Image (spheres, rainbow, N blue to C red):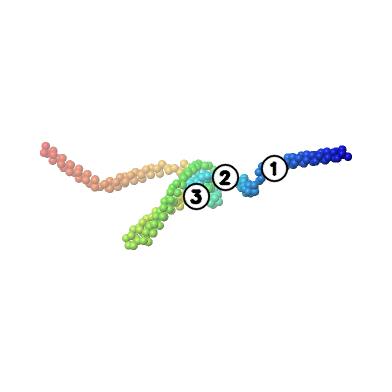
Amino acid sequence: MKYFKLFSIILLVLSIQSCENKATNAGKYANAALPVPDEEPSYQNYIADSAASPQKEEKQQQPKEKKQPIVNVEWDKKIIKTALLNLEVKDYTGYYSSLREKIKNIGGYIAQEEQRQSAYKIENTLVIKVPVEQFDNALVQLTDKAEKLNEKKITSQDVSAEYIDIRSRMESKKQVRQQYIALLKQAKNMEDILNVQSEINSIQEEIEAAAGRVEFLGHSSAYSSINLTYYQVLNSSASDNDKPSFGTRISAAFKTGWEWITSLFVGLVSVWPLCLVTFFALIFYRRMKPAKVKQS
């Protein structure tokens, strides 16, 4: 009985020690599985990070501002273009009809026309105005049906600087005119009114002259000029007959000589005082010469 009690006590002690070891190991495993953070997350830091994240996204999404290229603005250039054409055609009447139709289609017009005809040929000279953007096209259309192109000359004149200068001067004159008009309203006597009105009239004339020049340059640069001469040979053998004959040239020579003589006579008459003085000087000289001989 004594031994049985001792054995029970030993078993109880061993059981208690075993339970303590299990609890210690469980605590170790729990500490290893759930590590305690060194610092707890702050709620304010979370709010700050949440507010900053949309701004970062906006910066990433916002495209970079591109620098606008510098554009060189050119002047409204005023260039006067002129062309000179001389050509031979096969059908004078047909070419003329086609010419008028082509000029009408490109928006141009005939400013001047002169026709001549001889036994050798029939000829027409025109001054044609065409829009400057149709200038090259007009040259092609006017020469496409030519039998022979004898001459082609193109010139260009840049009047942009003159156009801008005149316009700026004209605007300045208008401002000066307005100032004189204001002075005219303040004038109190007739003399001041007349003086100011005279200045206004003078400035108005300058403005009108400048406006006319500006309009001329604008129209000349907007419409180019083509001086066209075309002809049709009627009789090639008649070209020598167009020259004056020998008798005609002799008659013209006599006429020229007579005109020269009459011109000389008219010239002498125009200096008659000098001729009269010379005549009396000769008479006086002849009378004085014998008297000197007798004295000697």
Viewer can see residue 123: no
Q: CA distance from mark 3 to mark 1?
A: 90 Å
Q: Which residue is mark 1?
A: 36
Q: Say which amino acid is labelled 3.
A: Ala
Between marks 2 and 1, how big is the CA–CA gap? 51 Å
Residue at which label 3 appears: 222
Residue drawn at 36 percent across, 61 percent down:
186
Q: Secondary structure at mark 2?
A: loop
The tag earlier along the polypeptide, 2 or 1, is 1
Element type at marker 3? helix
State the residue position of label 2. 66
Amino acid type for the residue under numbered disc 2: Lys
291 lies left or right of 29: left
Q: Mark 2 or 1, which is nearer the eye?
A: 1
Q: Earlier in the sequence, mark 3 or mark 1?
A: 1
Q: Position of residue 67 (x, y in %)?
A: 55, 44
Q: Quadrant of the C terminus?
A: top left
| Nearer to us: label 2 or label 3 | 2
**Do the numbered discs 2 and 3 sit on residues whose CB atoms are within 8 Å?**
no
- Mark sitting earlier along the chain (2/3): 2
